[in-house]
Amino acid sequence: MRAIAVAAAAAATVHGAAGTAAAGGGLHGLVPQPLPHKPSFTLTDTAGRPFRFASATGGKLTYLYFGYTHCPDACPTTMADLATALHEQSPAVRRHIEVVFVTVDPRRDTRRVLRTWLNHFDRSFVGLTGSPTSIAAAEQSAGIPVAPPSKVTGSNYAVAHSTFLFPFSPDGVAHVVYVQGFHSADYAHDMPLLLRYSH
């Protein structure tokens, strides 16, 4: 699975240099090889309930992102752009889309902190947390290289994390991935197209 991230990173370099989309079929995202399949993991949602990612999001276009609420740039930008793109869709499209944000900073991102932060973007966004071990296992199951643990001192610290955004279509496959440099217009354009991939 780690090869997925490496391939996407290489494609992202091309995207950043040329400013052009790498996907076929009219999609704006980058095409990783092999195409990632929806991972299966269980974490805890902001209400304290177990959230079984694969089954809870079955049949939907599901955006999966690993980040943290104190992130100064990538995380809030990605969530804001996703919220904007989602609000541009018709109700018929929106009800088939789920956004799942997994914190990589469970020390500061309590369930309450995570819920409050996500509500700034969209109240429908799902926030997940867990032990550092279970979160790392979820990252690995998604094919994301796990960053080495940060040296934590005090309460003001940065956490290294991936900026990959995985949109798993209803067929359980991410036909494209996104990295920093994509915007709400790209997400909005691709949402109806990604929904067409079904079982």
Image (spheres, rainbow, N blue to C red):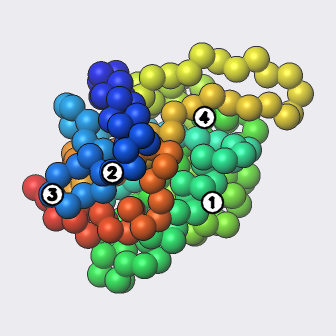
Query: Left of 182 or right of it: where is 102?
Result: right
Residue in the picture at 35% in, 37% down: 14
- For marks 2 and 1, the one nearer the N-term is 2
- Separation (CA) of disc 3 from disc 2: 14 Å
Residue type, label 2:
Thr
Residue highlighted by disc 4: 104
As helix, strand or loop, the secondary structure at mark 4 comes to loop
Q: Which mark is residue 20?
A: 2
- For marks 2 and 4, the one nearer the N-term is 2
As helix, strand or loop, the secondary structure at mark 3 comes to loop
- Separation (CA) of disc 3 from disc 1: 32 Å
State the residue lying farthest toward the right: 154
Question: Quadrant location of the N terminus?
Answer: top left
Q: Position of residue 142 (x, y in %)?
A: 36, 33
Residue highlighted by disc 3: 25
- Separation (CA) of disc 2 from disc 1: 30 Å
- For marks 3 and 4, the one nearer the N-term is 3
Residue in the picture at 33% in, 51% down: 20
- Separation (CA) of disc 1 from disc 4: 15 Å
- Separation (CA) of disc 3 from disc 4: 33 Å
Residue type, label 1:
Leu
Q: Are marks 3 and 2 in contact (CB under 8 Å)?
A: no
Residue highlighted by disc 1: 118
